[in-house]
Image (cartoon, rainbow, N blue to C red):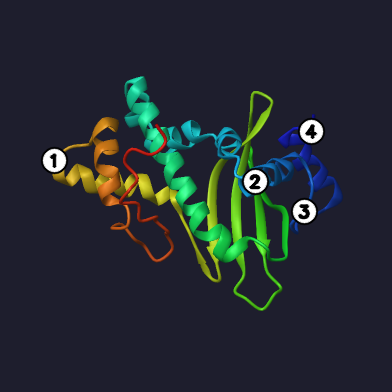
Amino acid sequence: MLTLAGVAALALASGACAPRSGGPAVAVVEELEQAWQRGDRERVHDIVDFRARIEEMLGDVWRGAPPEDQDEAVDLARAMFDTTMERYWTSQYEGRPHQTRISRIDGPHVWVESRASGDGRSDFAWIYRVTSSQGRYRVTQRELKLGPVQSNTSAFYPLALKRIGQEYGRRPTLSELNANLPSLLGTMRERTYVVPDLKHLKGRGR
């Protein structure tokens, strides 16, 4: 199996600085999108490493939480992921000419861009970060870009912690974050950040 180091070595050996196509990271993204297209949400959720992504953004708030609170946080993250896919897949991506290729390699991560363009409409792209862990490639981050505007999911949880922390007068626990997250969705917006408005979020995924 080709490792991320192998992908990087091949890119350096060829002198390629421009985006490349092919490779295991691209295959993972294509599998995710095919699973979404056929409605196989279980497979999509298996390809995305929600736990690693949440731990990356929450740190000790995640690591110090009971397993049941971690499970609920993953359920909420899956619901947000699905809602964003549902919102943009049909309206911006499905049925359009598109190309999926590596855009850059960043340490242990391979960034893969799946761009729809060339049909007279505004360009749209799903941007996936694919990471290898224990010999398996999984998506550990997903952004979207519509025209010049790109999402920044890395800002979401820190903003949520700050907002909830202001109400509690201290750093919230994961349980408190889970309880307050649905009411915050759609209220925290930055120019380069897309947040799904999910009034129905609580109760999904369990």
On the rendered structure, is 26 left or right of 197?
A: right
Label 2 sits on residue: 38
Q: Farthest right residue?
A: 14
Q: State the quadrant of the N terminus.
A: top right
Say if mark 1 contacts mark 4, CB within 8 Å: no
Say which label, 4 or 3, has the lower sequence index.
4
Q: Label 4 is placed on what type of residue?
A: Leu
Residue located 72% across and 55% down the image: 100
Inter-mark Cα distance, 2 to 1: 46 Å
**Label 1 sits on residue:** 169
Q: Report, in whole angstroms, how far the alpha carbon at label 4 lies from the one at label 3.
A: 15 Å
Residue 164: percent from the left, percent from the top? Answer: 22, 44
User: Residue at point 36% right, 44% down?
Assistant: 157
Amino acid at pointer 1:
Gly
Camera-side residue of 122 and 132 = 122
User: Foreground: 36 or 59?
Assistant: 36
Q: In the rendered view of the protein, which quadrant contains the C terminus?
A: top left
* Circle 3 residue: 20
Q: Are marks 3 and 2 in contact (CB under 8 Å)?
A: no
Q: How far apart are labels 2 and 4 at the CA level?
A: 28 Å
The residue carrying mark 4 is: 2
Q: Earlier in the sequence, mark 3 or mark 2?
A: 3
**Tag 4 or tag 2, which sits nearer the N-term?**
4
CA–CA distance in space, label 1 to label 4 = 49 Å
Q: Disc 3 on helix, strand or loop?
A: loop
Is the residue marked by circle 4 packed among few (<14), some (14-19), or many (20+) residues within 10 Å? few
Q: Position of residue 104 (x, y in %)?
A: 67, 51
